[in-house]
Image: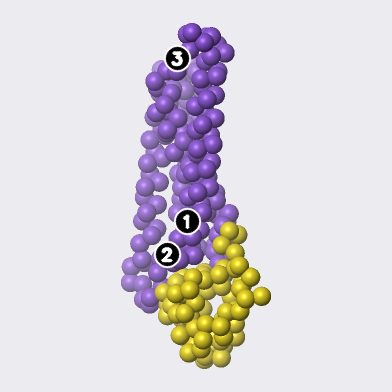
Chain colours: A yellow, B purple
Amino acid sequence: MPADNAGIENTIRRLRFEHGEMTQQDLAERVSVTRQTIIALEAGRYAPSLPLAVRIARVFGVGVEDVFQID
Amino acid sequence: MHTQQKAAWFDLIVIGGTVVLYLAAVPALSWWFHRTLAEAAVPALGVFGLIGLTGFGRLFYRSPRGALGNEPVMDERDWLLSRQAWNAGMATFWLLFCIAGVGTWAYLYYLRGLERVTVPVGIFPAMIGAGFIVFMLARSVATLHYYGWKASDAGR
């Protein structure tokens, strides 16, 4: 897989469940990406761009570093 | 199945189907026009015009009719993978194109000698056409390699 995660881990799955068990589809639509990208993010197989990371953090109402952490 | 996977599979099916049709057309033309297989092989190349059907692959990139929500057809990850698949296709094309260009000259030099070596002008458009097919093939295979070959692989 060429689009690797560059050593970035995330808590998207946990945050989704803490926000009313939000589905991957819901999150994808709210940040304007495909559901497959959310799946790849949660699996740690893709490092998002900065704008996407900020959009995801805003959906959950937390800071970017609360969602993404570098090893 | 992701849009990119559908488009890649469509390209592979069109290219594969065209090759099968070509292999069927050679003996058919040979039998119909009472020519040898070698003589029929050149006019049968017209079958490769069907490769143009790959242009319909763009239809996969339309948003589904009546789709709700804000999910795009392509996002940043798709563009990244698309660019990498494109690079794989171009690299394969350029490698084979250079080998074919030098190889043709070397082969004719071997046959005719330095003073009489001339590359037939028809070789060049044939190389471009074959190169386009190689590019499409390599790009499609790379796309399916990145996304996975099955529908369930799309987000891997």
Mark 3, secondary structure of its residue: loop
> Closer to the camera, B98 or A24?
B98
- The chain that hosts pointer 2 is B
Q: Do the residues under discs 3 and 1 have CB atoms within 8 angstroms? A: no
For label 2, the residue is: B74
- Mark 1: few/some/many CA within 10 Å (<14, 14-19, 20+): some
Q: Nearer the viewer, mark 2 or mark 3?
A: 3
Residue shown at the point (53%, 9%) measured from the top left: B113
For label 1, the residue is: B82
Residue shown at the point (33%, 68%) measured from the top left: B65
Mark 1, secondary structure of its residue: helix
Position of B48 relative to B2 (above/below): above
Residue B118's label in the rendered image is: 3
> Closer to the camera, A64 or B134?
A64
Q: Amino acid at mark 3?
A: Thr
Count of numbered badges drawn on the protein: 3
